[in-house]
Amino acid sequence: MKRVMVTKTGGPEVITVEEAPVPKPGAGEALVKMEAAGLNYADIMQREGVYLGGPTPPFGAGFEVAGVIEELGEGVNEWRVGDAVMALCSNAFSEYVCVPASNLIKKPNQLDFAQAAAVPCQYLTAYHTLITLADVQPDQRVLIQAAAGGLGTMLVQVAKQRGAVVIGTAGASAKCELIRELGGDYAINYREQDFESEVKSITDGVGCDLVIESVGGEVFDKSLRCVKTRGRLVVLGVASGEPRQVDTVSLLFHNLTVSGFHLMAYTQDEIAMQHACSDLYAWVASGLLRINIGATFSLDQVAEAQQKLASRETTGKVIILP
Ligand SMILES: NC(=O)c1ccc[n+]([C@@H]2O[C@H](COP(=O)([O-])OP(=O)(O)OC[C@H]3O[C@@H](n4cnc5c(N)ncnc54)[C@H](OP(=O)(O)O)[C@@H]3O)[C@@H](O)[C@H]2O)c1
C-alpha cells in the first residue's frame, strides 16, 4: 500500500510517498481502508517540528481519517467489518490505517467520506470550544478569526446553531462571502478594514462576549481588545508562529478570561463526545451543518496540499484522497 511519510523536520520537500505492507490491527484496534483523510494546519506544524508534543520524524503523516473497517483486532466487539467510520489516528495519509477502536465514530449516512474526514478534528474542535468549554448562549456576540478556513467554517456554523451573533474575519473578499453564506452575520476582510475598529462599531463599542483566536501575533493583541468586560477569549492556535504574552493587569481591570483549548483533552470525555455526536447526526440530517470541501488532493500531492494551506490559498476543508 501507499503511505505518506515525513522523513525529517523541514519544508514540504521532506514529505515522501513510499510503499509499505498493509498493517495488521493489534488488540483493541481496527484496520480502516482510507477513503478520505483530512489535512489540518497541525500537519504543517508537525512537519516543521513546531507542534508541541508532536511526533518525531520519521513519522507517517496525517491524523484524521474516514473509511471502512476492513479487519478487527482482538477484543474489538462493538464494531463490524464493513462499518463506515471516521477517527483521529496516526498515519492517516495511508491507503490502510490501524485505529484504536476507542477513537472510532460512526459516519453519518448523509455525509460522503470526504465530508466525514472533516469531522474528527475540525467539527469536534468547533463543538467542544463553543459548547463544551464556552457554553455560547443565544444573542451572544462571537468573533471568529480565520472564519473561512477548515476550522473557521465549522465554528461559524456551530455558533449559529446556538443562536449567537457571529462576526468572522478573513483575508479575501471571496472568503468573506463564504462566511456570510454559512450564516455569519458580519464578515470582515482584515486586509481592507481594521477588524478591531469594525468590531467596536458593530458592537456599539461594547466588544464581544467570546473571541476565538487561532492566529497569534498582532491578531491576538487586537482580538483581546475586542473582548467585552467579563468576556472570554479562547486560544486555539498560533498560525502566524508568533505566540503572545498576556498583560495580566488588563485582564483583571476588564474582568477578562483567556482560555486555551486543545481537542485531545476533550476526546476522552464520554458525555461531551455523546453530545457532540448526537448534535452532529441531527444537524447533518436536517441540513443545518454544511461541510465545505475547499480542495482535494491525492496521496502523491500532500506536499502541494500543505503548501496551499500554509499560504492561505484554501477555504473550508482540504481533503486527501487515496
Ligand atoms: N486547539 C485545537 O485543538 C485545534 C484544533 C484544530 C485546529 N486548530 C488551529 O486552528 C487554526 C486553523 O486550523 P485549520 O486546519 O482549520 O486551518 P485553516 O483555517 O483552514 O487555514 C489557516 C488559515 O489561517 C489564516 N491565517 C492567518 N494568519 C496566517 C498565517 N500567518 N499563516 C497561515 N495562515 C494564516 C488564513 O486565513 P485568512 O486568509 O482568512 O487569514 C488561513 O487560511 C490553526 O491555528 C490550527 O492550529 C487548533
Image (cartoon, rainbow, N blue to C red):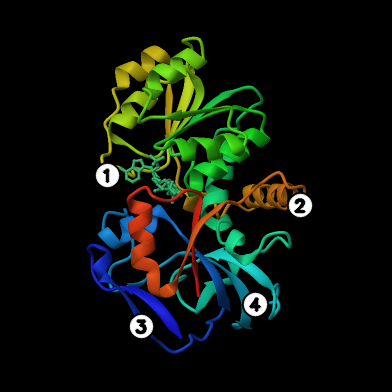
Mark 1 CB lies closer than 8 A to ligand 1 = yes
Q: Earlier in the sequence, mark 2 or mark 3?
A: 3
Observer able to see residue 147: no
Label ID, residue 76: 4
- Amino acid type, label 2: Ala
Q: Tell me if mark 3 has few (under 14), some (14-19) or many (20+) residues whose alpha carbon lies within 10 angstroms of its own.
A: few
Q: Nearer the viewer, mark 2 or mark 4?
A: 2
- State yes or no: discs 4 and 1 in contact (Cβ < 8 Å): no
Q: Tell me if mark 1 has few (under 14), some (14-19) or many (20+) residues whose alpha carbon lies within 10 angstroms of its own.
A: few
Quadrant of ligand 1: it is top left
Q: Tell me if mark 2 has few (under 14), some (14-19) or many (20+) residues whose alpha carbon lies within 10 angstroms of its own.
A: some
- Amino acid type, label 1: Gly
In this rendering, position of residue 163 left or right of residue 11? right
- In this view, the residue farthest toward the top is 204
Question: Does dot 4 land on a helix, a strand or a loop?
Answer: loop
Q: Percent x, y for residue 98?
A: 51, 77
Residue bearing the label numbered 2: 285
Q: Percent x, y for residue 202?
A: 51, 16
Q: CA distance from mark 3 to mark 1?
A: 30 Å
Viewer-closest of 49 and 15: 15
Question: Does dot 3 land on a helix, a strand or a loop?
Answer: strand
Label ID, residue 241: 1
Q: Earlier in the sequence, mark 2 or mark 4?
A: 4
Residue bearing the label numbered 3: 18
Question: Does dot 2 land on a helix, a strand or a loop?
Answer: helix
Q: CA distance from mark 2 to mark 4?
A: 28 Å
Q: CA distance from mark 1 to mark 2?
A: 38 Å
Q: Is residue 133 above or below residue 5?
A: above
Q: Is residue 116 above or below residue 233?
A: below
- Amino acid type, label 4: Val
